[in-house]
Amino acid sequence: MKRKANSVWRLSQWELMLIILTIAAAACSAQLSPYYLNLDQIADSSRQFIIPGLLALGLMVVVVLGEIDISLASTLAVGTVMLSKFSAFHVQLWLAFPVVLVICALLGALNGVLVAWLGLPSLAVTLGTMGAYRGLAFIIGTEQGYTDFDDSYLWCGTERVLGDIVPVSLIVFGVVALVVGFVVHQTVFGRRCFSVGHNKDAAWFSGIEVRKLKIQTYTLAGALAALAALVWIGQYGSARGDNADGMILFVITAVVLGGVDISGGRGTVLGVVLSLLLLGTIRNGMGCRKVWYLVPFAC
Amino acid sequence: MSPVTKEATFPSTVQRRTFSELALKIRVSGVLAFLLIISVIFSLLTARFFTVQNITVIASNAAILAIVASAQAIVLLTRNVDVSAGSMMGFTAYLTADYAARHQGIGAELVFMALVIGVVLGIINGLLVAYGKVSSLIATLATMSLYRGFTYIYAHGQEVTSNKLPRWMLNSVDLRIGGIPALVILCILIVAGVAIFLRDYPLGRQIYAVGSNPLASVFYGLRTQRIILLAYGLSGLLCGFAGLLYAARVGTVTVILASGWEMASLAAAVIGGVSVTGGSGTVIGAALGALVLATVDNGLVLLGIPEFWRMFVQGSSIVAAAAVDVFIGLKIRDSLQRRRFGRTLV
């Protein structure tokens, strides 16, 4: 029992390094700009990583299985334009969001079915569905942006609570990270994911339904993309087919920088969260979108 | 239980073997059949499709993509992937165009410059993947942003407009030899050259060997790291050249030139039957895949279908092509096992 608790709470060297780098980046930023050290500003900077962060948490589980999903940003775009359509027809959010959640989860599941049941290479499949879902988002939403959202749709991405400081989206992200962390590190499902990532054949021989597991993780990633879509709408107040185009790069960077082995079987949710914090801090501090591209080389 | 049974002599297995061999051929001819089918469909739907002028347009549009697709195919054959193709094109295009704009008298050495820049960029990828042991997807994703980032830094928000480029550069792309665009002829020559290199030369065969079984090729005594480096270098060379051609064709060179081409080239290669799991496929297939994409693009535009459907069709065709690829791969495995053991193993 004690060992188990140890393995969860003990920080690996990698995670420790991420924390140190984050602190260093924050210190540098504070030196560079007098406006940096400000609670309001720092809370606001969470905008930089929450949307890709939600995608990264979904992608992390897929990567642990030894697969990859580069269609997530397109799934997000389908989510935003679907929400914009619902908003245009004055559908209540409590009705609209679950529908969008299910649709995005189904898009994820389609990836999973193609990968697991047809045995296709996941890079090729999700490369294809990346284009197909992006096309779908444009077909649903046309190239006209939609900005006339109902306030209830925007609440999740804009509102701040607890003395008007902590953004709701940050709390959502925290809760999702805790839930995914629990599922991945504390449940049988999670252990199975790791064992499939380590050795697919051995996992199959020991009675794990590899195909079902793969479909489940892809579905989870799709569902999280729907949540990211809701946050997107709140943050940007607009929805269009090209939403989050190219974001998947940042997401993959975050997952890999978080110490998740791209060939599967190794990685922690904590690492991914810490790498998101680091990337968010660098992005915020430098105020320069191009600098984070150098980060993969630093490690 | 001996693996060799007498089943091998049964006539029924012989028949099934020929079916599997047919499947092998489908991989090469499938993309051609697909091309014919969509051409017939578009010809029936619109009269403007099957004209000499339109076919020339399609061929010119496909030419540069075909070169990049063969570059992508070389890397895919070694069981790696190159997502930085578009950025390499953009980087080379911007640097050479900027240099040409500053030195108006420059001649053919510009081509040499583009090739050198391309090779250097490709070799950086290759070093990371082969010697740095970074997963190829991660390494080239990183260099994709890195090369694009350097282009941004170098450009300082500027762009090279077409009136600054030397005239010969712009004219040479529109040149026609006997009614056929020079670009198309050049593309055919390059693709044919790469195809012959891969098919008939030891180094080319080694690229296939590394891709179909990296471990076995190490045991066989191949220097897999060097071969992967060579594949990336070759890919960079072709991308650099394609970048120069694209810059000349577009005229105005911006920092985002050729972004998104990595996906288009991957799509073309996969549609053309190049396996993403390495070791199987031809550059001619990849070039035909580029032709398929250009044809679909052109046909959908002529039919007045919104551009988004193109993405949808393109994406779906990648998935379909990957599915066909896996199916044929299974058939080939069955066929090989039948030849060896006279029956299918699980």
Image (cartoon, helix red, strand yellow):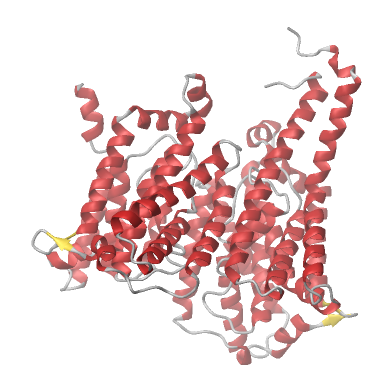
Q: Position of residue B158 (x, y in %)?
A: 48, 84
**Relative side of A57 to B56, left or right:** left
Can residue B145 be seen in this snapshot? yes
> A290 or B292, which lies in front?
B292
Image side of residue A85 versus residue B236, left or right = left
B323 or B254, nearer to the observer: B323
Q: Which residue is drawn at 46% across and 30% down?
A: A196
Please say if B323 is above or below B140.
Answer: above
Comparing B311 with A248, the one in front is B311
- Within the image, what quadrant is residue A85 found in? bottom left
Could you tell me which residue is drawn at 82 percent across and 54 percent down?
B33
Quadrant assignment, res B96: bottom right
- Is residue A238 shown left or right of residue B11? left
Q: Position of residue A181 (x, y in %)?
A: 29, 39
Check the picture and name the quadrant holding the N terminus of chain A: top left
> How far from the left and from the top, in percent, is residue B345?
71, 21
Q: Where is residue B77 in the image (x, y as percent from the top left)?
A: 68, 47
Tell me if residue A299 can be seen.
Answer: no
Residue at the spot x=36%, y=71% of the render?
A238
